[in-house]
Amino acid sequence: MGTAFYILMGILGVLCLINFFSAKAQKKSKVRTFGMWVNGVPLLMILLAIIIAVFLK
């Protein structure tokens, strides 16, 4: 994978992390839980993609 992949995944990861912590700061509700799932799952997928790319390199 090229440098652009790591830059793009880094930017998307940071955005997901910011949204995740923003959702976590809200009071407990179904919307908060949904927001944490919507931001947590892609964050884990991004981390997994980076780990796989590093090991295949």
Image (spheres, grey):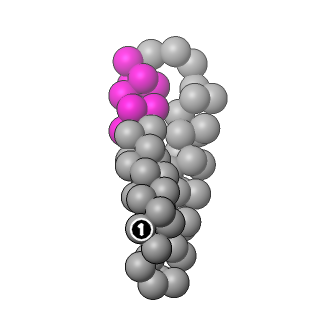
Tell me residue 51's x, y (percent). Answer: 48, 57
- Left or right? Give the position of 57 relative to 10: left
- Amino acid identity at mark 1: Leu
Q: Image height check: is 47 above or below 10? A: above
Q: Give the range drawn in magenta.
A: 30-38
Q: Which residue is drawn at 59% across and 48% down?
A: 18
In front of the other: 40 or 25: 40
Q: Nearer the viewer, residue 53 or 39?
A: 53
Q: Name the residue under label 1.
A: 56
Q: Say whether residue 9 is magenta.
A: no
Could you tell me which residue is drawn at 50 percent across and 66 percent down?
54
Identity of the residue drawn at 53% across and 39% down: 20
Magenta stretch: dominant secondary structure: helix
43 left or right, relative to 24:
left
Percent position (x, y) of residue 57?
46, 74
Q: Is residue 32 magenta?
A: yes
Which residue lies at the image location 48% right of the left edge and 52% below the top edge? Answer: 47
When the figure is inspected, residue 17 is found, relative to residue 50, above or below; the finding is above
Q: Give the percent coordinates (x, y) of residue 50.
A: 47, 61
- Whether residue 7 is visible to the viewer of this picture, yes or no, is yes
